[in-house]
Amino acid sequence: MSADVELSDVSVTFGSFYAAKNVNVKVNGGEFFSFLGPSGCGKTTLLRAISGFQEPSEGKVLIDNKDMSGIGPNKRPTALIFQNLALFPLMSVSENIAFSLEVRGVSKEERKKRADELLELIALEGQGDKKVHQLSGGQKQRVAIARALAVEPKVLLLDEPLSALDLKLRQRMRTELREIQKRVNITFIYITHDQGEALTMSDRIAVMNEGELEQIGKCDEVYNNPLTPFVATFVGENNPLYGKVTGIEGDKAKIETADGQYLATMNESKKLNIGDESIAFVRPESLFIPRDGDNFDNKIDVNIESFEFEGNLKNFYASLKSGAKIKFSVPNAIDTSSITSGSSIVLGFESSKSVILPKASLAID
Amino acid sequence: MMGIYIFIFFAYLFGPLIIMSITAFNSAEFPSITPWECFSFRWFNEGKIAYDGQHLAGLLSDWRLHDGIISSLIIGAGVVTLSVPIGMAAAIVLTQVRSQLRDIYYSISIMPVLFPGVIIGISTVVLWDRIAGLGGEGFIADIGRNGIFLTILAQTCFISTYCFLIFVARLQRFDQTQEEAALDLGASQTQVFFKILVPYLSPAIASAAVIAFLFSFENYNTTVFSILSDQTLTTVIASKVRLGISPALSALALTIIALTIIAAVTYEVLRRRAEKRYAESEEKFVKEKAADNRINKKYKAGFRIPKGITAILLIVVFATYGATQIVKNDLYGQSCIDTADKKKKSKFLEQLQTLESNELTDEELSGGSLGGNQDYGDIFGDPSLFQDFGGFD
Ligand SMILES: Nc1ncnc2c1ncn2[C@@H]1O[C@H](COP(=O)(O)OP(=O)(O)OP(=O)(O)O)[C@@H](O)[C@H]1O
Ligand SMILES: [Mg+2]
C-alpha cells in the first residue's frame, strides 16, 4: 500500500525566517522521490511538515488526498527515519523493530513473528537479541528502516539516513534501499545533500535552495536540462560562461563572452532575448579535445594549468584568455600524454550539450 | 606523600565517628574512652537503671527514639513519594521551555535550596495554621495541625529541588529525537512517557529517591519547627543532647554507620556483579564476531596487594591492642559492671555522709563569729569532695 503525498503551497516560518517557501510538489504513490539541496536549505523542515512534527505556517499537506492539518505524527500513515536514526538504546534490536506494534497492543507472539520477518528483510536474522550499540553503522541503519517498516506505513520518509556511513557502505546501502523499496512497494521520500545519492536512487528529484523548490523532474531531465544556474551547478559539475545574448536561432541562442561566441540550447520555459545577461553551461565531460574530422559547434582556446587523476577519469583544470577557469574530463582510456601543464589547446563542445540560462547565482560548494 | 595526605584526610573525616563508635561499648554513663569502665553492649540493649530508679535508656529500650525513628521513616517515605514526581515534572517542563524564560524558570526552581531551612519550616507552620483556622473543626483543621504532614510538606519544598537538579542533569543528555521517533511510530504521549522517558530516567529516579530519603531523614532545622508536638529522630537526639549526651546515642550512631556501610557495600557488590555479567555478554559478542583468536587468549591477572592495606593493618593492630588490654585488665562482662556500679554507689554514699557530717550545728549557726568558708564547715575546702565523683546516677 502506497499513497500520494502532495504539498500545496507549503511555507514554514520560524519567526520571520522562511525555512520553506511556497513549496508545491506532488509525489506519486510507490515513487522513490528525493529532495536534494545544500545543508540548511529546509529539507528536514519539509520532511517534518509531512510527518506532522511541524505544522506548515501556510499551505497544506495532503496524504492520499486527505488534508493532514491538525493530525499528529502518531496518526499519520508515515514513518520517519531520522537523520541520527534515533534508535532506542535501552531496547534490543527486536524490541526496537516491534515498538510500533507494541504501542498498538499487538500480542507478543505476533510481534516476535513480525520482527523476525523484518530481520530477514534487512538480512539480520538471529540478531534480534543484540543491543543497539552492538551493531555496526550499516546494521543500525537497516534496523532503523525495519523499525519504520514494521507499522506498514504508506509513506516512508528518510532524512539523510546514509550521511554517517563511509563511502563503500553508503554505496551498498543505496542499492539495498532501492531493493527494499521495490520489495515493499511504498512511497519513499528521501532527503539528501548528495547529488550522486539522489541521482542513483530516485525516480524523480526536487532540487531545493534556501527554502524554495528550484526544479522537479526525472534525474536525467534535471541533469541535462537544468532550469536555473543553481540547479546547473548543484547537480553535477558545470562550467559557467558568462556573457550577453547576441542572437537567437530557433531554440538556440548565441552568447558573447569575453573569450568568444558560443552557441547553446535554451530551455523552453526560460526563453531569452537579445541583450539579456546570461550564462551558458557546459559540463566537464561534454568538452572534447577535437580529433581529425571532428566538427564541433563551439571551440574554446584554453591554457592547461594542472590535472588530476581520478581513476576512470582524468580531470584537467585550464584557464581562458580572460582568466576564467574551466574544467574538463577525459576518460582514462584516451591517451593524453601530449597534454601537460602550460600547453595551449583547443576544446570543442556541441551546442546541444550546453544550456543557456538567464543570469542568477550559482551553487557554491 | 600522597598516602600521608589521604591518611590525614580520612582521619579527619572518620576520626570523630570512630571515637564515638568506641564509646558506645563503654559501660560508663557518659560517653568516654578514658577512663574505660567496662566493655559492654548495654547501651545497645536496655541501658541502665540507676539505684535511684532513674532509667538511662539504651538503644533498645528508648521508646522516644523508636517513635522518632518511626516518624522519620514515615516522613522520609512521604517526602520521597512527593519530591521525586515533583522534581521530575519540573525537570521535564524545563526541557520544553525555550528562550529567556528558561533561565528565569530555572532560577525560580532552584530557589528553595537557597532559603534557610528554618524559614521554610516556620512559614509552612504559619500558613497551615491559618488554613487550619479557616474551616473550624474537621479534616483540614486536623491535617493542618499534624506535625508529620506539615514536615512532609516543608521538607518536600526544598528536597524536590535536589531531585529536580538530578533529573535536569540526566535529561540534558537525553536525545529528544527518541521521543519524536516513538511518536512517529504511533505511540501516544503517555506511551512515550512510560516506554521511553521513564526507562531512560530510571537511574535518576533511583538516586533521587535515595537522596530525598537521606535528606529527609537527617533534616533538623526545618523539621524542628514543622514537627509541632511530634518528634523525629533528629529532634529526639537534639532534645537528648540538651539534657546531656548518653552513650546510647553513640550506639545509635554506630548502628546508622553500620547500616550505611552495609548498604553501600551491597550496592557496590551488586553493581560489580551486573557489570561483570554485562562485560561477559559483551565479550561473548566480540568473540563471536572476531575470528581472530588472539582475542580469545586468557590473560592471568597477577596478584596485587591492595593499596588500602596499611589502613586495614593499622585498624587491626589498634583493635587487637584494645581487646587484649580489656581482657587482661578484666574490663568486660557483667561482673565488671557490677563492681563498677557498686564502687560508684559506695562513693555516692560516702559523699552523702560527708555532707551530713558537715551539717552545721545550731550553735555554729547562731554564734558563729567568723564569716566565709569556715562558717560552713569548710565543705568546699574538702579536697576529696568532687574527686572520683561518679556522677549523680
Ligand atoms: N526549530 C527551529 N527554529 C528556528 N530555525 C530553525 C528551526 N529548525 C530549522 N531552522 C532553520 O531552518 C533552516 C532549514 O533547516 P533544516 O533543518 O530544514 O535544514 P536541512 O536542509 O535539513 O539541512 P541539513 O542538510 O544540514 O540537515 C535552517 O536555516 C535552520 O537554521
Ligand atoms: Mg536536515
Image (cartoon, helix red, strand yellow):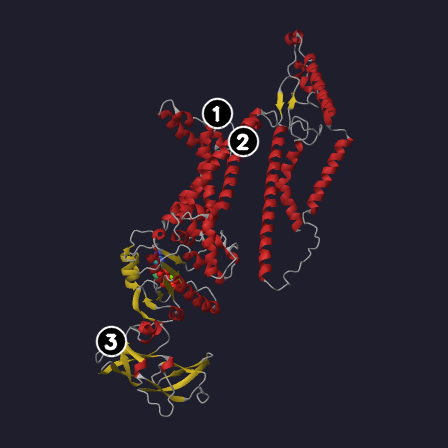
Instruction: Label 2, secondary structure: give it.
Output: helix
A138 w.r.t. A276: above or below: above
Disc 2 target residue? B234
Give the crowd class for mark 2: few <14, some 14-19, many >=20 residues within 10 Å: many
Instruction: Pick the quarter of the image with the C terminus of chain A.
Output: bottom left
Classify mark 1 as within 8 Å of ligand 1 or not, answering yes or no.
no
Quadrant of res B393: top right
The residue located at (48%, 56%) in the rendering is A116
Marking on residue A268: 3
Label placed on residue B34: none
Disc 3 to disc 2: CB gap under 8 Å: no
Q: Nearer the viewer, mark 1 or mark 3?
A: 3
- Name above or below for residue A204 compared with residue B22: below
Residue B149 location (% of width, % of height): 45, 30
The percent coordinates of residue A272 (x first, y second) are 23, 77
Mark 1: amino acid: Ser
- Gap between marks 3 and 2 measured at Cα: 89 Å
Identity, as a three-letter code, of the amino acid under mark 3: Glu
